[in-house]
Amino acid sequence: MAFALKEAGLEVWVWNRTPERARALAEAFGLKAVPLERAPEARLLVNATRVGLGDPQATPLPPELFPQEGAAVDLVYKPLWTRFLKEAQAQGLKVQTGLPMLAWQGALAFRIWTGLLPDPLGMEEAALRALGEASRA
């Protein structure tokens, strides 16, 4: 995720619960490692951790550190609506679940193996059914 955002021309900051890990990741991709207190300066928050996956009440970032405007993405897809996303939405941020990324990863993997690219939106619908979530339609 960090690499893709950087390739898109965005300035990417890395935060990790372990500062040494943040610095190592930042160095590996030519990014900046920043302390958690800088989170409100961001315009896009991405949870690329497992936080929220096993415990739906867990969140990687307290809502008081959300920016005043912007967006939040949680790569966790079960539960689809994590506490992180619910709190971000309640703060007025635009939000995106991890489901589209899961569907596109699956579609691209399918293409690698078969040469065919299935419809990622159809794959999202199938994933929603498999996860026991309501359909988008």
Image (cartoon, grey):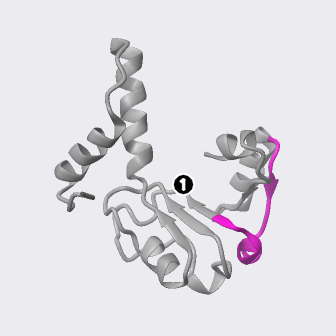
Residue at 73 percent of width and 61 percent of height = 19
Please give the range of residues in magenta. Answer: 30-44
Residue located farthest toward the front when viewing the structure as drawn = 137
Queried whether the magenta region covers residue 32, the answer comes back as yes
Sort mark 1 into few (<14), some (14-19) or many (20+) by Cα contacts within 10 Å: some
Q: How many marks?
A: 1
Residue 5 location, x and y as percent? 68, 46
Mark 1 sits on what residue?
48
Residue, x 34% and y 71% (percent of image)?
A: 56
User: How far across and down, in percent of the image, does residue 87 sit?
Assistant: 48, 80
Q: Amino acid at mark 1?
A: Ala
**Which quadrant of the figure has residue 40?**
bottom right
Pick whichever, 81 or 135, lies toward us. 135
Residue 6 in magenta?
A: no
> In the figure, 129 relative to 19: above or below?
above
The answer to which quarter of the image holds residue 38 is bottom right
Horizontally, residue 39 falls left or right of residue 1, namely right
